[in-house]
Image (cartoon, helix red, strand yellow):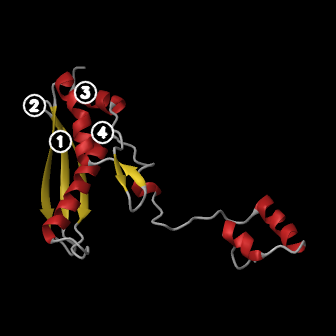
Amino acid sequence: MKTLNDKLAYMQANFKSKKSRFNFFGKYNFRSAEDILEAIKPYLTELNVSVRIEEEYVEGNVPMLKSLAIFTDGKDSIHATAIVGVDLNQKGMQVPQQFGSASSYGKKYALGNLLLIDDTQDSDATNTHDKITKPKLSGEALNKAKEYIKSGGDIKAIKSKYNVTPAVE
């Protein structure tokens, strides 16, 4: 591996970080920035590179933090950015905690962008926040539902399993 790009590509292809943390409120596993940083350490000496994160405050209507994940060999560097808002109205947190929470989130996503961590199955992609998503009543299920109603079945039972639009009802 000669170039910095080759080293980063190697790391992106081979890097894995477990979701070692659990959110009891949302009932899902997730990884933190600290988990990612711990998992990259073996690659740093192997590839003779370093990773660091820089942050800066971004002024605007909503306070924001810009997190920059930097992959470098001391000569050249490649970076990825994440910008996150700071929720100053978050209940139960003091201002330093609100900024700390945004900072952790920004670091995680800047590192994820740099290392191509696919979080499509991460909590932010799959958490419904207790909203139950029911399948739409259509096709064969609709035909079976019609037969069920004709034979004396209750529409409430169908609505408990399917999203029934007013037009279908």
Residue assigned mark 1:
70
The residue located at (36%, 30%) in the rendering is 13
Secondary structure of the residue carrying tag 4 is helix
Give the amino acid at mark 1. Ile
For marks 4 and 1 on the same chain, the one whose residue lies earlier in the sequence: 1
The residue located at (41%, 50%) in the rendering is 122
Give the amino acid at mark 2. Lys
Give the amino acid at mark 3. Lys
Residue furthest out toward the top = 1
Mark pair 3, 2: CA separation: 13 Å
Residue toward you, 119 or 5: 119
For marks 2 and 1 on the same chain, the one whose residue lies earlier in the sequence: 1
Residue assigned mark 2:
75
Residue assigned mark 3:
7
User: Are the residues flagged by discs 4 and 2 in contact, CB closer than 8 Å?
Assistant: no
Q: Position of residue 151 (x, y in %)?
A: 90, 71
Which numbered disc, 3 or 2, marks the residue closer to the eye?
A: 3
| In this picture, residue 28 sits left or right of residue 112 | right
Residue assigned mark 4:
115
Secondary structure of the residue carrying tag 1 is strand
For marks 3 and 4 on the same chain, the one whose residue lies earlier in the sequence: 3
Mark pair 3, 1: CA separation: 13 Å
Query: Height in image: 63 above or below 20?
Result: below
